[in-house]
Image: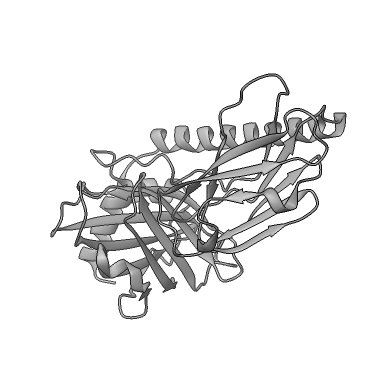
Amino acid sequence: MSSSSFVVFLGLLLASGASVAQSEAAAPSPGMRRIELAPDEALSAPEIAISAGLSTTFIFDSDLKRDEVEVEGRDRFSLVDVGQATLRLVPSARLTAGERLRLVVRFRDGAAPASTSFQLRVHPAKAEPLIEVYRGRRTIETYQQEAREVRAELMRCQDEVARLVAEQNAPGGLAGLVSSSALDEHGVTGRVVTKDVAQAAGNANALEATSVKSYRSATGVAIEINLKVKAGAPPWVAKGVTLRGKAGAELKVLRLWQQRPIPIGEFGLVVVEADAPTKGSQGPFSLKLWEEDGPRMITLGNVTFP
């Protein structure tokens, strides 16, 4: 890698100046969610995130009327599997990111509430994998499990705050990389992977990656993407990102940095940085970038790192 490319990359990675902030980049993958239905209160339809090719399973504490489950746009799902007290949904690629669909289930025993509805929101890359729905009182075990999950999330947040504080106190430039142990005697290695990366067929309508470079330091990896916006409005701003391996495991994304909102017909730089020890991060990976509440997204397959 040339010294000029190295300096440009370091500047992007460590810059503390103006950039497009991304709140969704470091968010963890959603786990189990619990929803309680009150018998005497009108409950607005909870919003559930679904995504093409990813499974979302509902587990109810009461038997369903299996022939009366209503899924809006059912023919655009790869799988709708209704069990005695379960419902599994796998959307197909025919659904559009940002689209909202109605789901209605009815219960067999006739107790209140006799039915409930959900709003399914199509996300470009993330889905809620498991939703538990309770009509009656929950067991003490479920509350204990929820308390354990809250404590685990609190610890994760505390670790994230400590990391951010440490970064604010660290020096910039090469000294910052050395002080954070991100730089060892091998330095930062880079590779141009534009020809190796496979862009999903649907991307060409709105977004195109004209060049892709990957980097590795002692503690993580980064991807530098030169992105062209070909269609849609307003100017494109990256909201979220996933970096998923063949087995489905995701790398923890630390930063999603964008140089500026990208107008139609113009180019812009997007940098993704992820926490990645050498073991398990050789690739290939699939990278997805999406905008907030919009259909424009880009999927890059076969992403590898030095």
Q: Who is closer to the viewer here, 7 or 63?
A: 63
Q: Who is closer to the viewer here, 297 or 159?
A: 297
Question: What x and y, as percent, mark residue 226?
Answer: 24, 63
What is the quadrant of the N terminus in the image?
bottom left
Farthest residue in the left direction? 265
Q: Quadrant of residue 135?
A: top right
Q: From the viewer's perspective, tell me whether residue 244 is left or right of residue 23.
A: right
Question: What x and y, as percent, mark residue 111?
Answer: 80, 30
Q: Is residue 44 visible?
A: yes
Question: What x and y, as percent, mark residue 189?
Answer: 38, 68
Q: Quadrant of residue 281?
A: bottom right
What is the quadrant of the C terminus in the image?
bottom left
Name above or below for residue 32 compared with residue 210: above
Q: How is the rendered protein coloured? A: one colour
Name above or below for residue 264 compared with residue 4: above
Q: Residue at x 19, y 51 (%)?
A: 262
Q: Is residue 306 visible?
A: no
Question: What x and y, as percent, mark residue 47?
Answer: 54, 38
Farthest residue in the right direction? 140
Q: Residue at x 28, y 58 (%)?
A: 9
Farthest residue in the bottom direction? 195
Q: Residue at x 37, y 75 (%)?
A: 197
Q: Residue at x 35, y 40 (%)?
A: 171
Q: From the viewer's perspective, tell me whether residue 261 is left or right of residue 32.
A: left
Name above or below for residue 188 compared with residue 262: below
